Image (cartoon, grey):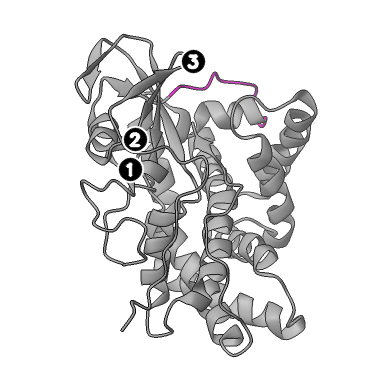
Amino acid sequence: MSDPTPLIPPGPDTPACGPPTLDGGVWSVTRHADVCAVLADPDFQVPEAAPGPPGTLAWLRGTVARFSGPGRHPARRAAAVAALADCAPDGLRRDAARLTAEELDRDPRAGSAGLARGVPLRVLAGRLGLADPVVAVPAVTVVAAAYQPGAGPAAVRRADRAVAALVAMSPAGPSEALANRIGLLVQACAATAALIDTAARYAPAVPPSVPTATLLAEVLRLDPPVRATRRIAVRPARVGGQPVPAGAELVLRFDAANRDPAVVTAPERFAPGRSVLTFGAGPHGCPGERHALALATGVVDVLRERRADTVTRPELGPARTRPAVSR
């Protein structure tokens, strides 16, 4: 009898696992063990963002835990964790499922991409206390499009206005609490949407008996919504036996490390229960992992239930576009 589980090849831009390599002045780290070592090593830090005027995109970047160095990161991460304290994952899952069902009742042809972006943000914004979750969705989307450094001036101006709107509809509080509350929404925007949309695409090839949480875990490994993250060496160090000078930039490739044959047998086979690095690890591991998975589960549960009798087996393969690198 043939194996019913699908094979999902790596994306065309996913490098093979191997020793760290230097390309264009940037180190590419692909092996599972090497990525884990860098994430846990204090000699490698996230690139910090410069501060900016209150209520602007630069202020948001310069105040969130995501772009903070070791001196400021613990307090800012604690602010994000505190904001999530009232967002029980089970409640997020139920709210996401209810809202998805309501949207499909209103429009049975609603696409998974639209549901994937709108539903999680509306649910999370409501739980985080924003005054108008519906209006918050497009504002968060605008900010997310310019969140990573390198956005053009027009995108930054739009994001500045959107940040100001999100501040106005957020609960009052200290600057760090306010910024990290908004930062949670921005972090959840594109990545959670991509996870949901990809899981919906793969779902028809997976037996209905496979729980949605299990499906999502393997999608995170095989076709991660965020393919890589960056670190800077703050002093001379070694990675995978290679000497790395202070100031060197490293790109940690989750997409490659998740398929490392030294850790995963038959890495292209859809087989839940594997090691997944997509949410990161160490001090900068995502504090909202359980919350993002709960939101995604709520949406995908309903999509699988509603469309079980109408979908056909897809042509499997990683999506061509993703938020490629998280700073």
| Residue behind mark 2 | 30
Res. 32 image quadrant: top left
Classify residue 9 as left or right of residue 241.
Answer: right
| Residue behind mark 1 | 257
What residue sits 73% from the left and 43% below the top? Answer: 165
Badge 1: how crowded within 10 Å, few (<14), some, or many (20+)? many
What residue sits 48% from the left and 76% below the top? Answer: 205
The Cα–Cα distance between marks 2 and 1, rounded to whole angstroms, is: 5 Å
Amino acid type, residue under disc 2 in the picture: Thr
Magenta stretch: dominant secondary structure: loop
Amino acid type, residue under disc 3 in the picture: Gly
Query: Residue 319 location, x and y as percent?
Result: 57, 54
Amino acid type, residue under disc 1 in the picture: Ala
What residue sits 25% from the left and 37% below the top? Answer: 36
Q: In this picture, which residue range is highlighted in magenta?
A: 47-56
Residue 207, placed above or below residue 253: below
| In magenta segment, residue 53 | yes
Mark toward the start of the polypeptide (2 vs 1) = 2
Tell me the SS state at disc 3.
loop
What residue sits 32% from the left and 38% below the top? Answer: 17
The reply to whether residue 232 is in sight is yes
Residue 117, placed above or below residue 80: below
